[in-house]
Amino acid sequence: MAKPKILVLVAMATLGLAACGNTGGGTPAASKPDKVQIAAEGPFTGDQASIGKGALQAIQLAVKDFNKAGGVNGTQVQLLIWDDQHSAQTAQTLQAQGISEEEARRQFTDGAALRRMVAADEVAAACVFLASDAAAAISGEDLNVSAGLVMY
């Protein structure tokens, strides 16, 4: 019997939606995309459906909330549900329908002024600063550590 997958779909979907960023303030510099799709791939039916069901519900809720807040520059996110039925062969076939990780990174970083992803240590440095005495007078501000990606 195969070991059940540990699903990180919720975290990935949440991070993906947060990276698209729409907090309702500021002026958008990016153009409105024609279509925005994300895929949730996992065992939503079959012998491991109990693992995938909760993750899928959380992803659906995150997409609903994100769309309610305005989506990506005003475009609603469409959730694609890819049920791999806990089959490696099916998962591979479904994943081939999507874009490669390299292409996803390229599309994401094309929207950033620095044309790159943010490193974890850059986010950590901002957190350390905000927790320090040097930031004692900072209150109620947004600090986007985003490599210049428009996050509004």
Image (cartoon, grey):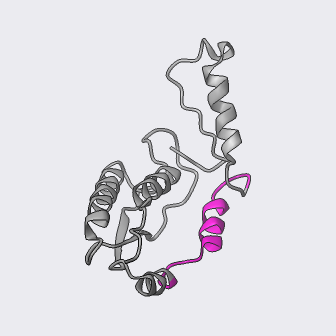
Q: Which residues are magenta?
A: 96-114
Of residues 107 and 48, the one nearer the viewer is 48
Q: Quadrant of residue 13?
A: bottom left
Q: Does 88 sit left or right of 128 as displayed?
A: left
Instruction: State the residue in front, 148 or 32.
Output: 148
Residue at image coords 55%, 77%? 99
Residue 34 drawn at (x, y percent): 46, 70
Give the residue drawn at x 25%, y 65%: 50
Looking at the figure, which quarter contains the N terminus?
Answer: bottom left
Is 140 colored magenta in this rendering? Answer: no
How many marks do you count on the picture?
0
Does residue 33 sit above or below 71 in this rendering? Answer: below
Residue lying furthest right: 114
Q: Main secondary structure of the magenta part?
A: helix
Where in the figure is residue 53, as x and y percent of width and height?
26, 64
Residue 132: x %, y % from top left? 65, 17
- Asked if residue 95 is positioned above or below residue 49 in the image, the reply reads below
Q: Would you identify the image quadrant in which residue 49 lies?
A: bottom left
**Which of the 4 image quarters holds residue 67?**
bottom left
Residue 101 part of the magenta segment:
yes
Residue at 54%, 60% in the rendered image: 31
The residue depicted at 72 percent of the width and 57 percent of the height is 115
Q: Nearer the viewer, residue 117 or 92?
A: 92
Give residue 137's position: percent from left, percent from top: 60, 12
Drawn side of residue 4 relative to residue 126, left or right: left
Q: Is residue 85 above or below residue 123?
A: below
Frontmost residue, 55 versus 122? 55
